Amino acid sequence: MLTEVSALAVSLGFLRWWLGRDKHPNVPHIRPGTDLAKDGPYYVVQSFLESHKRELPMHSYPLLETLGGLLKMNLHIINDPVKSKEIFSKSEAVGGHFELTGWWQLLAEYRRKTKGRNWETMTNETLGLMRDHTRSDPKGTKISKLCRRRLMELASKSNSSQNGWQKWTLRFHGWDRICKYANNALESAVKLDKYKLFFINLPTWLRAWIPLRFWPDWVSFQQGLYDDILDLQEMHNKNWVLGDESDTLLAILQTDHAQGKMEEWDVINLIQQLCMTGADTTASVASGIMMTLARFPEKQAKLYGILESQDFRADEFKDCPYLMAVIYEVYRYCPMIYRSLLHSITETTEIMGETFHKDELICYSITGTNMNEKYFKDPWKFIPERHLNEPGEFQKSQYQTPFNTGKRSCPGQILADIELFHFMKHFVKHFKFELHPDHPMPVVETEEGWNNFWTRDPHYAPMHHFLQPKERKFLLVPRDE
């Protein structure tokens, strides 16, 4: 008996060592400046800043350590902006989206367990845009790329009078509810809270034995968004049948489905993904622009003066380069979207001299580059003029990638810039942004001052899928007409 117990103890010890071993001992490992259970966006960003100070091309960071070390997950963060572009643009092995595919797979498993509408045709693979890009699944990769192309076509038409793709959405009366679903979806999909990471790491067969009451709350909540999308599809199809002119996104996607180019749930999930990506991200950046202009009133006055001098007429980016410079300086200086999405390795590959295997995680340290003197002079200062060339034209820095780069960069980046440009043009015209006397936001243009602006709350705190300021309240004061 003693022999068997000893053998079991040795076996468990070896298993713990094997699963918890450092797979990349040559990559510096930076731990958060707090307990891992209290880790949050601020501490992830601090690892970016430390890594850039040490001029590390890559570092690792712990995401999850549980079950006595049996379940351990590290994120490997690329710090070199030039290398990052090369890797995400050229590599065929970094096309997985672990944090997102796991999220959607939970939704699919829950819907099948509860037999929600259209559950019979839903699988863990029919994820639309979020299908992995991998050579082992050429069909799925092709579908994902087609979904991306459809969204980019939509974005390119959004600034055109010919855009009929979204006309039907205005007649759907559930958009307030859809926005609530969409904001919850983006937050729960992107945030790095430990319970979500633990749950999506469990094998499917093991999750099947877990009672639904123990599943994350957002899994059941998000089923309502699927039902609304199905209602929207039924409403759309009352006035459209296959073979009619495809002047809406749904018509185009349903035609693709009928032609065998994608599956039914690829269509539904792509509509869901469109709702998600167009919601919280743009709103957060817009609030960041207004908040930052309130903190730097001289830049706000300059922007207002330029727009006023041209009667607020600016139909294209080139019509007001300074507005574009303000937007991109806020992307840099107030980076609420502080990192790229997590990419998972789809096949064994070499990255920056290290061999990575399937399902290991990498991302790019957007904020680390943003605040590095090597790439941006006086990084702790808010200077929109850094984005203008000598003739005064907007010039984007080659080192700035707020939407990441490559085959899996944000497909809505053009639309985001367009929306922010026109949104802020009108807001600056009608409102002055001022700090709230009861909610101070001190302006100290040093590294310490910049760090003190952000909350230290953990990933599971509300809205902490993004880097969040300690204070968010400011005043919108109507300008005299």
Image (cartoon, rainbow, N blue to C red):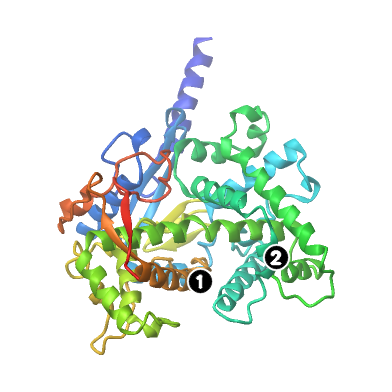
User: What label does residue 139 carry, if any?
Assistant: 2
Instruction: Give the residue type that dot 2 points to.
Output: Lys
Horizontal arrangement in the rendering, residue 453 relative to residue 280 (left or right): left
Work out whether 77 lies above or below 302. above
- Image location of residue 298, percent across then percent down: 20, 68
Pick the front one: 466 or 131? 466
State the residue in front, 441 or 94.
Answer: 441
Q: Residues within 10 Å of mark 2 (few under 14, many from 20)?
A: some
For the view shown, which residue lies furthest in the bottom direction? 391
SS for dot 1: helix
* Numbered label attached to residue 151: none
Which residue lies under the disc numbered 1? Answer: 415
Numbered disc 2: secondary structure: helix
Quick one: label 2 or label 1, which is nearer the N terminus?
A: 2
Name the image quarter holding residue 265. Answer: bottom right
Residue 29 visible to an observer of this rendering: no
Which amino acid does the dot numbered 1 rest on?
Leu
User: How far apart are labels 2 and 1 at the CA level?
Assistant: 28 Å
**325 above or below 263?**
below
Q: Give the image location of residue 312, x and y in percent.
A: 38, 79
- Please report the residue visible at 49 percent of the width from the left and 73 percent of the height from the top: 414
User: Is the residue marked by circle 1 packed among few (<14), some (14-19), or many (20+) residues within 10 Å?
Assistant: many
Q: If the image is split into quadrants, where does the N terminus sit? A: top right
Residue 329 appears left or right of 249: left
